[in-house]
Image (cartoon, grey):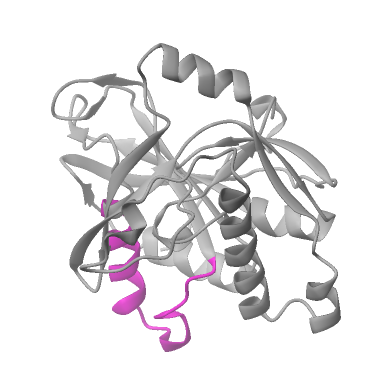
Amino acid sequence: MRTRIIFSLKNRGAYVPFHHQYLLAQFIKGLLLFGPEPAFRDYTRFNFSGLKGQTKVSRKGLHFYSSKVTLVFSCTEPAFRNYLLSQIFGQKDILIGSLHLVPDSVEDEPAIVMGEESKLLCISPIVPIQAGFNDDRGKRFIHPESDEFSDLLYESTIQRMEASGQFTADELSGFYRFQVVPDHDYLQRMQQANKKYARIYPLYDNDVKFEVRGYTFPFTLYAARQVQQFIYENGLGYFCHKGFGMLDMVNNNPAHRNPMQDAAYA
């Protein structure tokens, strides 16, 4: 289930770094680590976007000028979703970068049933290589149109599906069809305009900073329906619980989302 968490912004014009997922990841980690439910302190089967709103770009980062700021959160376990929302809405004042946010309301996005072929957009960068502190392998460039790129994402997806406990060994062995096909014209346009679709991003693990290479581009995914559904709900690639790998369907109409609901979790 995907949930849009809406915050009121108390200081319009405040800013966060252009890529600020690591700030959100640290915030969520703090809520879980010091929350009252021990079972969820190391929980990682969730995914989230960057903050969305009316923004302007400066050298400092993204300045927000809208009265509301939105975070898209995704998780397949309702108990964890409800627990995290209760923790977020228990905070009277949240500081992300220089943004002073106040939890306002939530809005559940309608469920999407995936097929075996999906056209997808990257809401946040995809990280195809597992990496850690003092490990430069995570910064290696892999061309998105190569077989290696698809193979790495397939391996990470199957590992995460197995770890979830939602699929049998027979089901997992049947999910052998998997291919990521980037929009070739988009990659060409980006290269011709001297723009990047692959960048180095900061990441923190146990408060230690390191860097990974993330990719953002539209692509078509060919895979079994169950694999597509898992990816849509849990993200693609590594470090999804740190704000990487969130996807959206091409032409997904936000007008079809469920009406906003006032939240009273505190």
Number of numbered discs = 0
Q: Report the residue that reaches farthest toward the top.
A: 193
Q: Main secondary structure of the magenta part?
A: helix
**Which residue is at 67% across, 25% downward?**
255
Q: Quadrant of the C terminus?
A: bottom left
Q: Quadrant of residue 110?
A: top right
Q: Give coordinates of residue 217: x percent, y percent.
A: 53, 32
> Front-most of 6 and 185?
185
Residue range (magenta) = 23-45
Q: Camera-side residue: 54 or 180?
A: 180
Report x, y in % for residue 75.
59, 61
Look at the image and tell me whether residue 265 can be seen: no
Residue 40 belongs to the span the image colors magenta: yes
Judge from the rendering whether residue 105 lies leftward or rightward of residue 174; answer left or right: left
Q: Vertical placement of 190 versus 232: above or below?
A: above
Vertical placement of residue 249 versus 137, above or below: above
The residue sitting at the bottom extreme is 38
Give the percent coordinates (x, y) of residue 141: 39, 45
Look at 81% across and 74% down and name the residue there.
173
State which quarter of the image contains the N terminus. Answer: bottom right
Q: Is residue 29 left or right of residue 183?
A: left
For the point 22% across and 37% down, which residue is it?
16
Taking the image as drawn, is residue 254 in sight? Answer: yes
Is 144 a magenta residue?
no
* Location of residue 90 (image quadrant): bottom left
| 97 left or right of 48 in image | left
Q: Residue at x 72, y 48 (%)?
A: 179
